[in-house]
Image: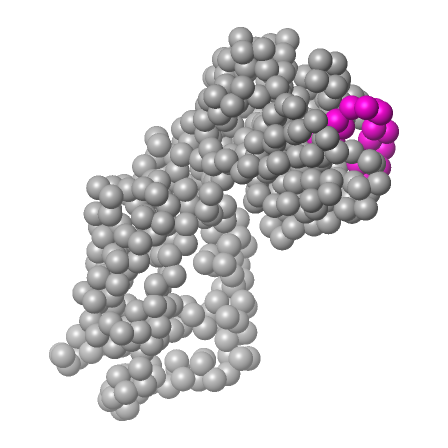
Amino acid sequence: MFKFIHSADIHLDSPMHRLDDYEGAPVDEFRQATRRAFEKLVDLALEEDVSFVLIAGDLYDGNWKDYNTGLYLVAQLKRFEVANIPVFVVAGNHDAASRITKNLSFPENVKMFASSRPDTFQLEDIRVAVHGQSYSSPAVKNNLAVNYPDPIAGYFNIGLLHTCATGREGHEAYAPCSLEDLRNKGYDYWALGHIHQYEILAEDPPIVFSGNTQGRHVRETDVKGCVVVNVDDAHRAELIFTPTDVVRWARAEVDVTSAQDPYEVIDLIRTHLEALYEEHGGMPLAVRVFVHGETAAHDEFLSDTERWEAEIRSAGNDVGNGGIWVEAIRIETESPASELALPKAGAMGELLEVFNELAGDENARRELLTELADLGKKLPRELKVDAGGLQFDDQWIAKVLNRVKPMLIRHLLHKEGVQ
């Protein structure tokens, strides 16, 4: 019997893009998150007294800003060496040889697989063979798995591979392979990296994505960690997913249909955030809040979004004494039809006519999107990559118009002295 840890996608010192843009963001806590998660991984290995540790690619997040990343990493890897725990690593697309211009020598216990060809490391005392190959470039499009060595008879054979497997949304199609490619090797366990979500692709033999050890943005929500694998004398593997993250990303979908005014909206959001905080066991959370529903509070809420969004952030800060940071807010509410008893003449009538035309005419919305196309090209990618971002399609422009309409109506009413 023996025990090992399967981990991947450490992304050490990942920059956590654009945190500085948000007032009140816990910048230091989030920037240190990948390091603290890696320390938890090392702590876990020592506590569990594992026989070895696997890292299935993307140990780094690309080239180092300076040598501090490397010095920190070597110090943590040294803890494995002191405990006599071997560490086997394949380089993934983020830490391929062609991208890393700075490097430091690893301790003797760390075995990095070559990128030129697949290779095998053996642990004779427990009869384990680990097969793997590192990336030679940031974009490996060929199937690496098919050329992995044959299994060694009488050993527990592990394939260590950074791959998209059969493909996953949001991840580049690197080192693609099929489940049959992996099964046909005859290995006892496949330790995969690259996909940032824990997933068991097959159980016999176990073909597993461990996911990343720490979520880095709102597209990497919920628990992140590694897999502790217990292997019995018959080479049967028991998998135990174990969290290592120190901060967690989440989405809050809040239905405010019942709210009659913005204060009730805030109360509903606060209640939802309190439940979310409890659900995650008091883990520090970065939450993107989605507010939806047909509510009487719609017009008033959107007429002064800066104020009410500040109220939402304040409500998040109240939970757990600062345990929730509201990363972004998406208002997707609608106004009940009965609320639209507005003047139909003059400037108000013209405004309503424009919005009604845009709401019912796809071609008119398409023309508006064409006018915004140049702006879309100039915006940074991170503002456009997720469902809550700037999509520049018909569904997105319809939501924008729905949000802008009450703001303009309220502004015009105040300008004309109508309360």
The one nearer the camera, 301 or 247, is: 247
| Left or right, 389 with reference to 318 | right
Relative vertical location of residue 206 with respect to residue 278 in this rendering, above or below: above
Residue 275 x, y percent position in the rendering: 31, 54
Q: Which of 346 and 279 is in front in this view?
A: 279
Find the residue positioned furthest to the front. Answer: 233
Query: Is residue 7 in view?
Result: no
Tell me which residue sits at (74%, 19%) in the image: 127
37 left or right, relative to 407: right
Decide: is 411 above or below 111: below
Name the residue at 58% across, 11% down.
84
Which sits in the foreground, 201 or 316?
201
Q: How many marks?
A: 0
Q: Which residue sits at x=66%, y=29%?
A: 232
Residue in front for this viewpoint, 192 or 207: 207
Q: In which quarter of the image is the C terminus?
A: bottom left
Quarter of the image for the N terminus: give it: top right
Residue at 57%, 43% (x, y): give it: 198
Quadrant assignment, res 211: top right
Q: Does the magenta stretch include residue 272?
A: no
Coloration mode: one colour
Instruction: Please tell me whether residue 287 is drawn above or below residue 406 in the rendered image.
Output: above
* Residue 395 in sight from this viewpoint: yes
x%, y% of residue 399? 43, 70
Q: Does the magenta stretch include residue 147?
A: yes
Q: Picture coordinates of residue 233 (x, y %)? A: 70, 27
Q: Quadrant of residue 304?
A: bottom left
Residue segment shown in magenta: 141-163
x, y percentage for residue 400? 41, 68
Q: Residue 1 vs residue 243: left or right?
A: right
